[in-house]
Image (spheres, rainbow, N blue to C red):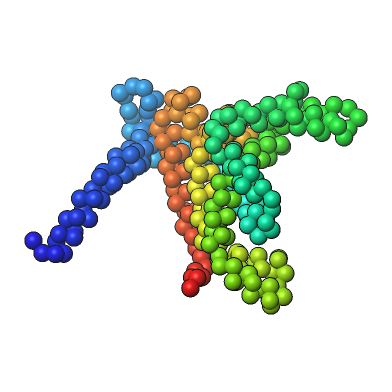
Amino acid sequence: MSRLAKRRLFVTIFLAPTFLFFSLFTLYPILKGMHISLYDWSGGSKKMKFIGLDNYRELLQDPIIWTAIKNDYFLVIGKVIGIIALATLFAVAITRFNIRGSGFYRVIFFIPNIISVVVIGVLWRYIYNPNTGFLNAFLSLFTDEPVQKAWLGEPGSAMWSLLWPSIWAGIGFYMILLIASILSIPKDLYEAADLDGATQGRQFWTVTVPLVWEQMKVSILHIVMTTLNGSFIIVWIMTEGGPDNSTQVMGSYLYQMGFRQYHMGYASAIGVLILVLSLITTVVLQRLLRRDTIELA
């Protein structure tokens, strides 16, 4: 056996298990979901009626799915702006301004990331409670009469009320990633910028941001993908898509149609839509965020 053949055999042997698990737990479910989306099926019986693209036609005419798409991208934009801005601010403050007890702050900000999403949802439901919640109690300190606003019960405020806990829960993880990236920047670059008279703000935009841009890009893409595919949990715990479907996201609507109304074919079509939108969004963001990579000598 030639040397090249041995290398190929070696690579094949080590990649085969990974490809097998990928095919079994990722590729097969995707293809199976696409297959089910072509049927009218309750999910609990053996009877499956082939209806072709009817589920997709119904999907395009469903006003709730358009609301869900809008809400998903509202969370995407809000989380990207809020998490990246705050995570970057805290990361720069901890690494560049020598704050005392910086290790303590890292732990405090990271705690929400080790708490279950279910616990976070329940916690914030109590915070938003119109009668006994902390938020209304705090706002009542500045008013003559007690505030009893139903933050999760009004369409105008419900989506904003879902955004804040999502931002709060995500800051710590991305802050740690950015801290590691900032600490890898040679101090000589900041010293040279100081000698040139650059202010802290100027150093941030000309030194810090360009050199941590790849990490920011990865963070943004990760936030987008986890939001489009995982915002269902926080929504279902806090509002179950209400009031009047005003906080539905694609994941929560999929769950409702598949496991509450037993319209599994339609739910599978929603799953395919999530996949397509995720892929399109990733490709577009990859192009928008592309810039020359700066390599440190």
Q: Is residue 241 shown left or right of residue 194?
A: left
Q: At 62% across and 54% down in the image, what residue appears? A: 91
Q: Position of residue 113 (x, y in %)?
A: 56, 39
Residue 212 in which image quadrant: bottom right
Q: Residue furthest right?
A: 144
Vertical relation: 208 (above or below) 263: below
Q: Position of residue 89 (x, y in %)?
A: 66, 54
Q: Is residue 273 shown left or right of residue 242?
A: left
Q: Position of residue 232 (x, y in %)?
A: 53, 35
Q: Residue furthest front?
A: 100
Q: Position of residue 65 (x, y in %)?
A: 54, 39
How many dots with numbers? 0
Task: Tell me the quarter of the image containing the N terminus.
Answer: bottom left
- Can see residue 268? yes
Q: At 64% across and 38% down in the image, what residue appears? A: 165
Vertical relation: 88 (above or below) 198: above
Residue 126 in which image quadrant: top right
Q: Residue furthest left?
A: 1
Return the residue nearer the eye: 223 or 104. Answer: 104
Q: Is residue 37 shown left or right of residue 9?
A: right
Return the residue nearer the eye: 204 or 85. Answer: 204
Return the residue nearer the eye: 105 or 130. Answer: 105
Q: At 25% across and 45% down in the image, what residue appears? A: 17
Q: At 71% across and 66% down in the image, what residue appears? A: 200
- Can see residue 64? no
Return the residue nearer the eye: 134 or 162. Answer: 134
Residue 66 in which image quadrant: top right
